[in-house]
Structures are given as C-alpha cells and as structure tokens.
Image: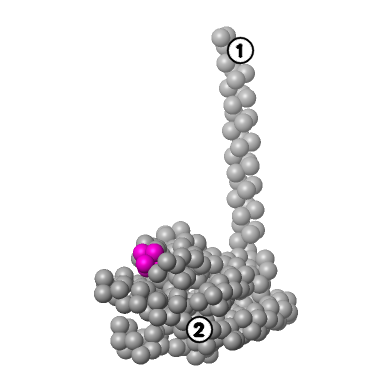
Amino acid sequence: MNMNRINYIAIIVTIIVIITIGLISLDQSSDLDYDEKPRVVVTILPQAEFIEKIAGDKVSITTMVPPGASPHTYEPRPSQMKEVTEAEMYAKVGTGLDFELVWMPKIIETNPNMLIVDSSEGTHLIEMGAHDNEYPLGAKDPHVWLSPKKAIIMVENLYEGLAKIDPDNKEYYAKNKDVYINSLKELDSTMMQTFSGLKTKKFMVYHDSWGYLAYDYGLEQIPIAKEGKEPTPEGIANLIDQARENNITIIFASPEFEIQTAKTIAKEIDGSVILISPLARDYIENLKKMSDEISKSLNES
Ligand SMILES: [Zn+2]
C-alpha cells in the first residue's frame, strides 16, 4: 500500500468521524427541544395513561415503576431520579403504595420545587381485607386505581395539576379530560351491567389488588397472597376448601408476581389460571377484560 493511498483512507475516515459527530450533536439538540415540554413523573403505568389522555403530547411522561415490575418492591434507577430533577410535577398515587412510602421523601428532596399531586385525593379508601386479621389493623388498600369510579376522581386531580403547571393549555386539557371521563363513565356502566345478576360473588386472585373493583361492584376477592406473603400449607388447604365451596375454577394471577402457588391451587380444584395485570397501561381495555373474565367465571361456577 503506498503513502497516497494511506492518506486517502485517512481523509475518508476523518470525514466519516466529522459527519458522525455532527449527527450525534444534531440528535442531542432535538432531544433538548423535546425536553422543553413540561415533564411529569408518575408512579405507575395507569397514571401515565391518564396523563396522556388529558395532555396528549404536550407533556413528557416518566413512569417510575416500569412494565413487569411491582410498586411494592421496585427501587428507582439513578437515571430515573435524574429525570425527577427535571420535572415540573410528580403525581403520586397517594394511597400508601410501598414505592411511595419508601421513595417519596427522597423524590421531594431531589426536586423540592416540583408540584406534588395526590392522584387519589378525595377518594374513599377502603381497609385492606376488612374483617381479616391477617392484615395490620386499619391498613388501607393502596390499589385505588382499579375501580373506574375511583379512576374518574384520579383523572380530575391529574387534570387540576396539569392545568397548574401549564395554564396556557388548560382549555385543551379540560376538553380531553371530559372526553376521557365520559369513556370511564361508559366503562363504569358496562361493568355495573356485567356484574349485576351474577350467580356468585366471590373470585380468587393471587395478589390482593382487586379490592376496589370488588367493593364498588358488589363482589368479593379471595386473595392467595396477602400483603405480599405466600400462604402457609394450612393457608393453601383452606384456600382450596374455599374455592370448592364457592365453585371457583378460575384463579386470577398477574405477570408482576410469581404464579406457582396459583397454579398449585388451580390444579387441586381442577381449574385454571388467568393472567391479568393490575398495572397495565391500557386501562379501559384491561378493566373490560378483567370484568369479562370475572363475570364469565362467576356465571359458569
Ligand atoms: Zn399490589
């Protein structure tokens, strides 16, 4: 290879490097534009869905607990805490979810100027497994978002927060909020219909997240794991008895939690396990699916 050829290659390589650096910095500057939108941080995915339905693409949304993770155990990554420093608003669920109990003080300390919105302000919180002494006395059920009746109040609260941090778009947000609340009201009346006149009322779940749905629609959830704790062998035997007494053949588990115990019980009662997440982002579709499956299982039993 002669010197001319080496020089030629060196020049080409230099040009490629310069173009690449140029493209990377262009890309970064477009990221900066994107970041000029108000940044809103939420704890769980259904809240991200609510914010998006109200604000469209006028805010950028960060969800702390990612798909597949549990808000009872998740710890934020450093990159997520950095996003908190750039946020105008943090919407907590506000019901004592473990993630918020542990991390809210740190989150507020990280960005003391951001608006903190309590999504569930004004909802009536129910006690975790009332009349069940396996729960701490008076402990509130944190899974408030899983009843559309409560979701409607949450969407109102989130709208109020968005209107505060971005008053220029208040009317746009109000219009979208009304449209979405109408869809939630439709979902609510569909569910009222679905659950009226069922033969039985009791459904079995692995994780105790469906208390508000049960409470608001006249049903009763029988949880396998309470407070995140696996049942004892006696507990499992007792659950199998309850399932048989109530003709239960379906056990609802979710992808965020282990399902072995649910499978074990399902096998004993000759039933099956259905996976439905309490944290799916696609809120209305997910709740429709859950209520259809519950009503199907209760009508068949
Ligand atoms: Zn939970």
Q: Nearer the viewer, residue 21 or 43?
A: 43
Badge count: 2
Magenta stretch encompasses residue 267: yes
Q: Nearer the viewer, residue 54 or 126?
A: 126
| Residues rendered magenta in the picture | 264-268
Mark 2 or mark 1: name the one nearer the start of the chain.
Answer: 1
Label 2 crowd (10 A; few <14 / some 14-19 / many >=20): some
Residue 54 lies in quadrant? bottom right
Residue tagged by mark 2? 200
The prevailing secondary structure element of the residues shown in magenta is: helix
Q: Residue at x 57, y 9 (%)?
A: 2
Residue 140: percent from left, percent from top: 40, 85
Residue 212: percent from left, percent from top: 49, 83
Q: Is residue 181 visible?
A: no
Q: Residue at x 64, y 36 (%)?
A: 19
Amino acid at the residue labelled 2: Thr
Ligand 1 closer than 8 Å to the CB at disc 2? no
Mark on residue 40? none
Amino acid at the residue labelled 1: Asn
Residue tagged by mark 1? 4
Q: Residue at x 36, y 64 (%)?
A: 264
Residue 141 lies in quadrant? bottom left
Secondary structure, mark 1, is: helix
